[in-house]
Amino acid sequence: MLLALCGALGTASAQSLGGLAPAAQAPSTSSPISESAKAKPRALSVGQAAPEFALLDQAGRERPLAELLAEVEQEQSALILVFYGKDFAPAATALLRAWKERLSQLEGPPPRVLGISSDLRERNARFHEFLELPFDLLSDPDQRVAKLYGAGSPPSATTGSTTAESAPHAVFVVGSKGHVTYLDRDFRSTPADDFRALLRALLLQTARPAQPIAASGATDAQQG
């Protein structure tokens, strides 16, 4: 399922005028410009250029997007950015294990997968070793890149705050030319429907032979 990212904008209330107006002066009907009338950034969508970034992987290497795209172009593959919650959280652990399993089922050169979270590099390194992942994990501690892609967690309905633990998993496929070719801001590792949709997008992009995806035996923890 493809979900559009919707920002919640409140409307500013009109401010009251202080003091009494002169008798001959008509009361003003003007009010401040509402927040909803102000221009707001559009959510990243398919066909748009992927925002640039340069993040540290679990080994401390800086990984700029431009460099990654050059590598996938040489491999005739695609770049998959997987935004997840927190290292060692049950949902994130199930998600990345599922990615590891799915990639092992593909024949030929696999797509380049990168996991991105707000965890520090050192914690990413422990999580990477714990899961024995065949792909790198990038550290986005201030969630700057997640916000650029519209993958940050939505505000809580009660407190208005955001937490990385409650962030829905989001997946973006970036082609070698730097444009988003597929996105899913509420990606689920089980059942396998989201993986099938993702593979269909990759098939169109790379023209690789179709590969079936079997349902995973692992049960994903509830998202959030």
Image: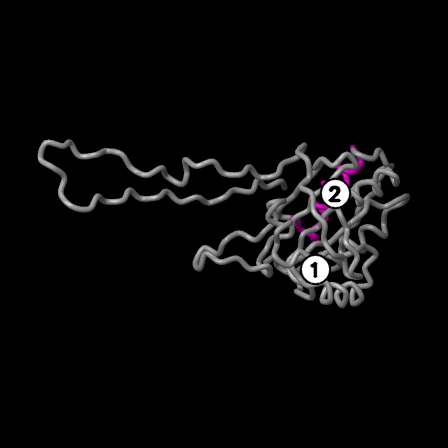
Apparent side of residue 10 relative to residue 210 in the rendered image (left or right): left
Q: Earlier in the sequence, mark 2 or mark 1?
A: 2
Q: Does residue 197 belong to the magenta stretch?
A: yes
| Residue 195 falls within the magenta-colored stretch | yes
Measuring from the top left, give residue 88's x and y in whole percent.
Answer: 69, 66
Q: Residues within 10 Å of mark 1 (few under 14, many from 20)?
A: few
Q: Quadrant of residue 108?
A: top right
Q: Give the residue pinned by disc 2.
A: 196
Task: Indicate the position of residue 68 as horizontal and vertical percent values.
Answer: 80, 45
Front one among 18 and 179:
18
Q: Which mark is residue 29?
A: none
Which image quarter is the C terminus in?
bottom right
**At 37% from the left edge and 39% from the top edge, which residue is drawn?**
34
Residue underneath mark 1: 219
Which of 66/200 is in front? 66
Q: Which residues are magenta?
A: 187-204
Which quadrant of the structure image shows residue 127?
bottom right
